[in-house]
Amino acid sequence: MHYPWWQVPFITAPMLIAAVSVLHVIVSHYAVGGGFFLAVETRYAYRHSRRDYLAYLKDHAWFFILVTVVYGAITGVGIWWTIGLASPLATEMLIHTFVFGWGMEYVFFVLEIASAFIFFYYWDKLRPKTHQTIGWIYAISAWISLVLISGITAFMLNPGGWPQRRDFWVGFFNPQFVPQTLARTGGAFLLTSLYVYLHASFRVKDADLRRLIEARSARPALVGSVLVVVGGVGWYAFLPASARAALAAATVLNVLMLVIFAVTAVVFVMMYWGPYRNPGWLSPGFAILFFACGLVAISTGEFIREAVRKPYIIYNVVMSNQILPEEIPTLRRVGYLESGTWTKAWVAAEYPQVMNGEEIDEAKLLTLPEEDQVRLGEVLFQYHCNDCHAGRYGYSSIGYLTRGWTPEMIRALVEAPERAKFFMPPFAGTKEEAELLSKYVVSLAPPFPSGMYFGNGR
Amino acid sequence: MDPTSLVGPSNPLGYPAPYWFLVSFKVLGFALHAVPMNLWYAGVILFMLLYLRGGANGRRLVGRLMKQMPIIVAYGINLGIIPLLFTQVAYYKVFYPATILMAWPWLSIIGLLTIAYYGIYVYIAGLRGDRLRWFNLAAGWVSAVLFIVMGFIFANGFSLMVNLDDWPSLWRGSDMGGAPLGLALNTGDPSLWPRWLMMFGLALTTTAAYIVVDTAFFAGKESAEYRRWATDLAFKVYTVGIVWFAVTGSWYAFGTWPSEARAAMFGGPQALLTALTAVGPGLPWLLILAQRRRLTRRLALFTGLAQFGVLALNAISRQVLQNVELSRFLDVTAEQVRMQWSPLLVFLILFVAGLSVTFWMISKVVEAERQAVGSAG
C-alpha cells in the first residue's frame, strides 16, 4: 500500500523470502557451529600432536570457507534483497528499529571474514596459540552475529513490550530472544556435525582418523539436539496466543512440528548409539542420510517460524499484507484504494471519472461497468491479498480455496476474513471496496466439482 | 501522473539518528565498499585480458592479484552492507519503489554474484596447477562479464531511485492489477549509460592504484624487472582510466544532468567539490608517474590514500547530486528523529573494538610474514 506490490506469478513474492531464507539458514548455522568445531578441534589436535587430524581440519577449513564465506555471505545479502522487494513495509519498520543492531552484526561479519581467511591461509605459519586464538575469534564473532540476528527475528514473532515503549533494547530482548538463541545455537551445533560427517566421509580414507572424527563430531550434535529441544520448548511457551492457535489449527504445521522433533530425536539416538558410542558407522550413505535429516529439520523449523506469525509479519506491528494495524480504522473509513499511495495513483490514472478532485469518490466505484469493477477488485486483491494468496492458480490460490463458493459466501469472507480464519488480516477497506473485491474473487472461483454424490438422487 | 504522488508516507518511527550521521556513514561505507568493488568491477576483466596479452609478467601479475580476489570480493560484499543499511534508513521512500519496479533484475544480482564469486575460485584453482585449462579461463571470463553486468544493474537501481519521472511509465508498462511485475530497467534514463561507464573508468584507476600498492608492499619476492613492468602497466591503466573517466564524466555532467543539478553542482560551495571530484584522479596519476623510475613504499602508500580520496570525493559528490535530484520530489532531511543513543553507542564501541581486533590479527599476519621472509633468507 505504501509501496508498489511486486506481483510474482504462481508462488507470490513472500515465498521467495522463504526460499532464500531456507537456502541461507542451512549454511549460516554451519557458519556458526563450524567455527566452534574448528576452534575446539584445532586445539585438541595441537594438544595431542595429531598432525593427521590437523591436516584434515585444514582441509575442512577450506571446505568451510568455500561454503560459508561465499555462499553463506551472498545468500545472507540475498535475504536483505528479497525482504526489501517482497515485504518493504516490514523491512522499513525493522530497519528503522534495528539499524544499529545490524550495524553491530556487520562489525562481527568483518571480524568473521578476516579471522576465517587468516585461520586458513596462515595455517602452519602462525604460532599454534595464535592460530587457535584466531579460530576462537571467528567462532565467537559468528556466534554473536547469530545472537544479534536472533534478537531481530524473535522480535518479529513476539516483540514483547516494544509496541508500547518503542525502545531498541525492549524490542531486542523480547520474550522469544533466549529460546530462539538457544534453538539456533543448538541447530548450528547439530548441523555442523552433519556437515563434518558429509565432508569426512568423502575425504578421509584412514579408518583410525575417520573414527576419531566420528566420535568427536558426535558431541556437538548431541549437545545441539538438547539445545534445540530446550529452545523449542521455550519458543512454544513464549508464543503469542495467536501463533499458538495457528500452530494448533493448521494441520500442516502440526505435522511439520512432529517432523522436526522426530528427526531431531532420530538423529540424537543414532548419533549416540552410532558414532559416539560405536564409531565405525561413517560412510557416504550414512552421512548423506544424516545431512538430509538435518536439512529437513532446519528448513521445516524456518517454515514454521514464518508461518505462525500470520496475520502479522511483525506481531501487532505490521500486518501480513503490508499495512500497520493502526491504519485499519482509517482505511475502513476513507478507503483502501484512496489511502494506498500506489492504488490511488492507479485509480486516478485509469478511472479519472471516479475522482472527486484529488480524492476517490467511493460511491462512484460501483457505478462503473461490471468489467471495470472486477479490474478494481483485482487491484485490491493484489495489494490486500497477494501476500499470501496467488490468484487463479498457484500457492494457496484464491481460485482453489473458493471453488464452488456462492457469491454470498465469498462476500461474507471478504468483509471479515479474520472471522472465518483468525490468522487472516481483517479487510481494510470500505463496503464498496469489499463489493469490488468480492466480484473479482467470484470471477476467479471455479465451479463446484461435478459428479459428486451426496445421497440425493443420481 | 505526478510522480510525487508515488512517494509514500514517512515512517512513524522516524530516523534513529540525525540525517547527517546516517548520510555520513552511508558515504563513508560506500567509499570503503568502492575500493574492493572497483577491483572486481574493472580488475577482473583487465586481468583476463592481461593473461592473454600481457606476456610472462602479465601472467605473474594476474596470478598475484587473482589469488587475492576471493578476499577482495568477500570484503567488498561485506563493506557494501553499511551503505545499503543507511540507504534503506534514509532513502526508503525511493529505494524500495525503485528496486521493486526492477525486482527481477535486482534480485538476479544474488545469483549472478554467486556464479561470479565461485567462478573466481574455479579460475584460481587453475592457477595453483601448472596451467589454466579451458574451464578455468571460461570461469574467469564469466566472472568478469557478470561483475560488469551487475554494475549495470546497480547503476539502473540507483539511477532509478532519483528518476521518479519515469516511474509511472515503467510501472504502467508492466503491471498486473496495478502491481508491477518487476521487469523494468531504467534504460530510458539518459544518465544511466554515462553513469555506468564513468564508474568503470573510475574502477580502472583504482585497479591501477592497487597494482602499485601490491607491487610496492606485497611483491618483495618478485624481480626488479617485474616491479618496473607492473608500475609501468599501472601508469598506462591509470591513464586510460582517467581519460575514460573524463570523457564519460563530461558526458554525464554536461549531457544528462538536469539544469537544476548543473546549477547546484557548478555554483556556490558545491562548485569546489565538483572541481575536486573532476581533477582528483590527477593526484594519484602524478604519483604513479613519479614512481615509474623508482617505486617507493612511501609514494605507493600515498597513491593508495590519494585514490581513496578520489573515491571518497566521488561518493560525496554523488550524495550531494542525489539529494539535489530528489529535492524536486521529497526532502530526505525532513523526517522526525527519535534518537537511539545507547544502541548507537554500543555500535560505535563495537566498531572500534572490531577494528582493534582486526588490527591485532593483521599484526600477527605481518609478524608471520616477516618470520617467513627471515627464515627464507
Image: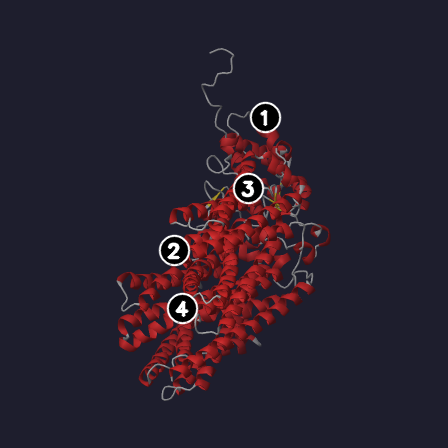
* Secondary structure category for the residue under label 1: helix
Q: Is residue A434 visible?
A: yes
Q: Are marks 4 and 1 on the same chain?
A: no
Q: CA distance from mark 3 to mark 4?
A: 43 Å
Q: Are marks 3 and 2 on the same chain?
A: yes
* Residue type pointed to by label 3: Phe
The disc, 1 or 3, on the residue closer to the chain's N-terminal end is 3
* Residue type pointed to by label 1: Glu
Q: Chain of mark 4?
A: B
Q: Are marks 1 and 3 on the same chain?
A: yes
Q: CA distance from mark 1 to mark 3?
A: 42 Å
* Residue type pointed to by label 4: Met
* Residue type pointed to by label 2: Ala
Q: Are marks 1 and 2 on the same chain?
A: yes
Mark 4 or mark 2, which is nearer to you?
2
The x, y position of residue A271, in whole percent, is: 49, 48
**Residue situated in front as seen by the camera: B45 or B217:** B217
**Mark number for residue B69?**
4
Which residue corresponds to mark 3?
A261
* Secondary structure category for the residue under label 4: helix
**Mark number for residue A408?**
1
Q: Is residue B163 visible?
A: no
* Picture residue at 40% right of the left edge, 80% below the top: B212
Mark 1 or mark 3, which is nearer to you?
3
The x, y position of residue A89, in whole percent, is: 59, 51
| Residue at far top of view | A457
Q: Quadrant of the rendered structure where residue A408 is?
A: top right
Q: CA distance from mark 4 to mark 2?
A: 37 Å
The disc, 1 or 2, on the residue closer to the chain's N-terminal end is 2
Which residue corresponds to mark 2?
A207
Query: Compared to A252, does A158 lie above or below?
Result: below
